Each structure stands twice: as C-alpha cells, then as structure tokens.
Image (cartoon, grey):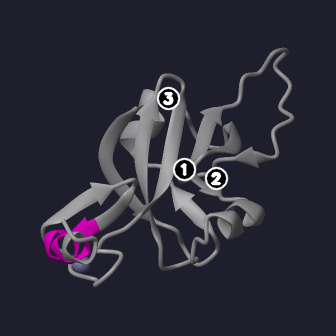
Amino acid sequence: MVATGLTRRIDKLGRIMIPIAIRNEYGIGEKDAVEIYTRDKFLVIKKYALPDGEIKSRYSTDNVGRIVLPKSIREDFAFVDGVDYVEFFTEQDSILLRKYEKECVICGKTEGLVLVKGKKICADCIQEIKQLSGN
Ligand SMILES: [Zn+2]
C-alpha cells in the first residue's frame, strides 16, 4: 500500500472528491461507475469492471469527480460530514481511504506526531504513556 500524502475533506453532503492525480492514474472519469466496500480500517474504491459493458454499480463519480460515500459506511467509520478528512492510499487496482487525524488523538497537538496503529499521537503523550506504564 502506498501513501499518497493526499487528503480531502468529506463535504456536508457526505461526498468526497477523489484527487485528480488518482482519478487519472486509475482511469476514473466523469460519471464512471465504482465499487465501494470496506476492508479493516479502510474504505476501498475500485473502478467498476464492466463484464459486458452494462453498468450495474450503485455508485458513480459525478461530473467533477466526487462520489457520495454510502451513509452506512460513513456511520461505521464515524465520519462527520463537513468536518472529517480522509487520507488516500493506492494499492494495485484499488484506492483506499482512511480517516485522517490532523492532530494528536489524545491532546490535540499538531506537531511531532507519530503514527501508532493508524492513530496520530504526539511525542509528549507517548512519553506520558510510557511513564504511566512504568517504563
Ligand atoms: Zn498529544
């Protein structure tokens, strides 16, 4: 899995803009059908394979490359519309999205963050946890 370093905010209508660089890489154009499903902490988007040219996917990009994230998935991931950001990763034929934490999940600090099991924690909080655990 490759981190793209790209993040986008979920808009107030639960839509996410797939960055143009990623859409180009995966050949996803306007109103293309996509599959959306979840895998662990990730939401997976794939261009919908068309076995016989017929489109049956429930999801598609709009004319500016946005997709509506299904409400059930937004709820499962505790995404807050208009507030939360997602981070984009790529892997073979899949685009993966994960909730993006801009700050330490414990104290809210935005500097010196370290990724621990997918959560951002600052060096001060890590030090404090170490002391609490007696190390
Ligand atoms: Zn902290």
In contact (CB < 8 Å): disc 2 and disc 1: yes
> Observer-nearest residue: 60 or 122?
122
Left or right placement of residue 8 versus residue 5 in this view: right
Residue 26, disc? 3
Mark in front: 3 vs 1: 3
* The N terminus, quarter of image: top left
How far apart are labels 2 and 1 at the CA level?
Answer: 5 Å
Left or right placement of residue 20 versus residue 108 in this view: right
Residue 9, quarter of the rendered image: bottom left
Residue drawn at x 69%, y 64% is: 76
Q: Which residue has dot 2 on it?
A: 62
Mark in front: 3 vs 2: 3
Q: Which residue has dot 1 on it?
A: 65
Residue drawn at x 77%, y 21% is: 50
Q: Residue 40 in the image: state x and y as whole percent.
A: 60, 46
- The first of marks 3 and 2 along the sequence is 3
Say which amino acid is labelled 2. Asp
Residue drawn at x 66%, y 59% is: 69
Position of 13 relative to 53 (above/below): below
Residue drawn at x 54%, y 50% is: 65
Position of 17 relative to 61 (above/below): below
Q: Say if the magenta span includes residue 122.
A: yes
In contact (CB < 8 Å): disc 3 and disc 1: no
